[in-house]
Image (cartoon, helix red, strand yellow):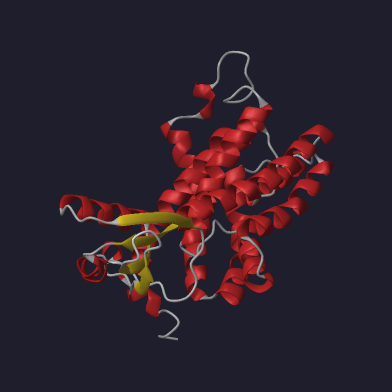
Amino acid sequence: MKEKIAFLKSAKFWKEIIILLLGILVGAAAVYYFLIPGNLILGSISGLAMVICSALEGIGVSIKVSMMVLALNSILLVLAYVFLGPEVGFKTVIASLVLGPFMDLWAWICPYESLMQPGMTSVMGSTVFDLLAFILLLGASQAILFRINASTGGLDIVALIMKKYLHCEIGTAVTVSGMAVCLSAFFVHPFHMVAIGIIGTWFNGIVVDYFTASLNKRKRVCIISPEYDRIRRYIVDDLYRGCSLYSQKGGFTGRENVEIQAILSQGEFASLMEFIRDNDIKAFITAGNCSEVYGLWRGGKQDR
């Protein structure tokens, strides 16, 4: 049992909890300011909560959407613990418990009614713009959480399980798991609103993949310099990253050289370029983006 909760003693875990809360705050704003007033139905636990609340209103039962979100998330927490492990389950518990209260926090800070112009039925005044604003904010929130191996709960748990066991892209998993919610909306919403929801769910998967790739992006750096050992020491000792050295021969000059290759984060690449520039090191440098890195990726100096 102690081994299962050992992550609670990690400073990295509690740093990720702070990131999680910020991500949930963004997601709660997306739901409160755009999903609810725009009456949008997307493949999310919030969309499912709206469908259920609408159905209950039809029989005279009134429940706040935020409370329904909390109830539905609670039901799916067991799945997160069983299939994704205790750390993901613990993070999901925190995320699911604070999503509803964070929506109420936004309502207290700035009610969406105060942002509506006279005669408008939503914040943006257009279903399309409401949809785009919601998807961009929600996609950013989901990408932040997925990056630290967490979720908002609900259907995101299903998406993480699909990603883990079916080895599919997280955006694809989000899209597939969300389609059931969109289809359930046929019972309480007109066809055109459901169609918009299906399109929005598909677009949400694309946005999640985009933000995920952006957050995971690394720089593959290749450097040829007569002071290669000085650069190597900076990468290893200051950035705390590994690198590879390759012997190569210049095709134009015919001189023997050493090429350094390293995979760095965006911030580390900027630090390396600053080091080379400030020390007036002559070097030929190329850099390209890597959206995914597998194998050993040690925490750099900036992560410590």
Residue 219 sits in which quadrant?
Answer: bottom left
Q: Is residue 21 above or below residue 162?
A: above
Q: Is residue 48 above or below residue 108?
A: below
Looking at this view, is 2 or 167 the one in front?
167
Residue 220 sits in which quadrant?
Answer: bottom left
Q: How many marks?
A: 0
Q: Residue furthest left?
A: 279
Horizontally, is 263 left or right of 92 in the view?
left
Residue 178, how many percent across, how many down? 71, 52
| Residue depicted at 45% across the width and 55% down the height | 288
Looking at this view, is 224 or 171 the one in front?
224
Residue 7, how many percent across, how many down? 39, 75
Which part of the image, by quadrant, shows the N terminus? bottom left
Q: Is residue 42 visible?
A: no
| Residue depicted at 43% across the width and 59% down the height | 218
Horizontally, is 242 left or right of 104 in the view?
left
Residue 65, how many percent across, how many down? 62, 43
Residue 49, how many percent across, how many down? 67, 47
Q: Is residue 111 above or below residue 23?
A: above
Looking at this view, is 141 or 81 the one in front?
141
| Residue depicted at 49% across the width and 22% down the height | 114
| Residue depicted at 21% across the width and 50% down the height | 277
Q: Is residue 182 above or below residue 171?
A: above
Q: Is residue 49 visible?
A: yes
Horizontally, is 255 left or right of 227 in the view?
right
Which part of the image, by quadrant, shows the C terminus? bottom left
Q: Residue furthest top?
A: 118
